[in-house]
Image (cartoon, coloured by chain):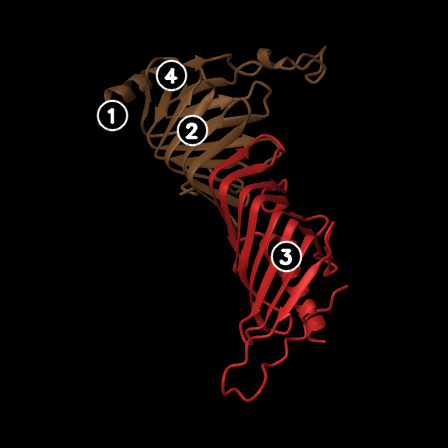
Amino acid sequence: MMWRGIDKALLFMGVAAALVVCVGCGRPPAPSAEKPPSAEKPAAAETPAPSLEIEESKVTVVDPGGQWTFQAESERIEARSMHGPYTLTPARARYEEVGRPPALMTADKAQIDQESRRVVFEGDVRISSGGWRVEADRAEYDLESGEVVATGNTKWTFSEGVGGEGESLSSDEAD
Amino acid sequence: MKKLIGFGVLLAMTAGVVTVAFAAAPKQAERMALRGFTIEGQSVQIPLSSQEPLEWTGPVTVTGSGFTLKCSNLKMWLTPDGRDAERVEASGNVNIAGRYVASDKTEWEVKGQAESASYERKAGQGILKGSVSFEARNLSTGAVVSAAAEKLTYDVKGRRFRFEGGERPVRMEWQEPEPQAGAGEAPAEGPQGESAK
């Protein structure tokens, strides 16, 4: 009953979800009591990968340093393997970082690739945060650098009341 | 006398262009000065987790408050709440165009060019740099005022402005419209713009 109308790919992901698959490094390591986090900053090459979790219809990526989280959800999630990449069609996502307004992202499709640590949004991409909103054909989000590059008919607008605090991932705010 | 008035009008208008293009009116500058502005470009880099600036690559078009700014590259540092711009830098064939309503309510069509432009919210300054040129046409009388300089600085709060010539002196021209055949009276004198300081 629960899986009615959902294709095999989603069923696969449902199984994966039931297992609560965790890929990557798991939860961010707790800071050592003996060594403050800033005391020994790891070299770039040694920076632990963001952890990625899948649960039901959500894919969550967590910063190893605990500063930010990226959560995407969709009615339809496909994966080539247990390790991804994961394709969400359509996709709604939310980026949250301490001390910053959250960013909401929507697109016709998003692909989350843990290996390359990138999220690619395609088709009617909309990103909003604080008092701005940007529309584009495509956007690529680098999970490591935290940078989004939006391309193709990009249109940036300043306006009140977009990407506001407290909006849930499920809201259609970015639409 | 006309030249002096024209110069004052020109300065008032250039000040207006810089202000409107990046900061809107001083009253609005305090809160979301860029509300309603749109920026279009080929691509934009958005740093979600750093203090790095947003960066558009061109051609870039900024539209708002009746003005359009075009350039090759645009960088913008947002305020922490993401609702306004702390600093804006435009570079590469900067072109500004639009209509400006002077303090005496006269309407002017303004065109401007520079190699770069910048606006800083805290300093309340708009700056045009590099082969700055401006042309403004009075939509009522047809009079045209123009100026060329190396740098133009406008103080938004103090409403003070300064042209700097660099190696070459600041050049300005005032052109009255050609009197039309059969017209009895000479064109009206230009509006009493704000004087240069």
The spot of residue B197 in percent (x, y) is 77, 63
Name the foreground residue: A52 vs B108.
B108
- Tell me which chain the residue with mark 4 is part of: A
Q: Nearer the viewer, mark 2 or mark 4?
A: 4
Secondary structure under the numbered disc 4 in the rendered image:
loop
Decide which of tag 2 and tag 4 comes sooner along the chain: 2
Looking at the rendered structure, whether the residues under marks 1 and 2 are on a common chain is answered as: yes
Query: Disc 1, disc 2: CB below 8 Å?
Result: no
Q: Mark 1 sits on what residue?
A: A6
Looking at the rendered structure, whether the residues under marks 2 and 4 are on a common chain is answered as: yes
Q: Mark 2 sits on what residue?
A: A72
Name the foreground residue: A157 vs B74.
B74
The N terminus of chain A, quarter of image: top left
Q: Of the residues shown, which amino acid type is indicated by label 1?
A: Ile
Q: Colour of chain A?
A: brown
Q: Which mark is residue B19?
A: 3
Q: Nearer the viewer, mark 3 or mark 4?
A: 3
Looking at the rendered structure, whether the residues under marks 1 and 4 are on a common chain is answered as: yes
Q: Mark 4 sits on what residue?
A: A84
Name the foreground residue: B97 vs A141.
B97
Q: Of the residues shown, which amino acid type is indicated by label 2?
A: Ala
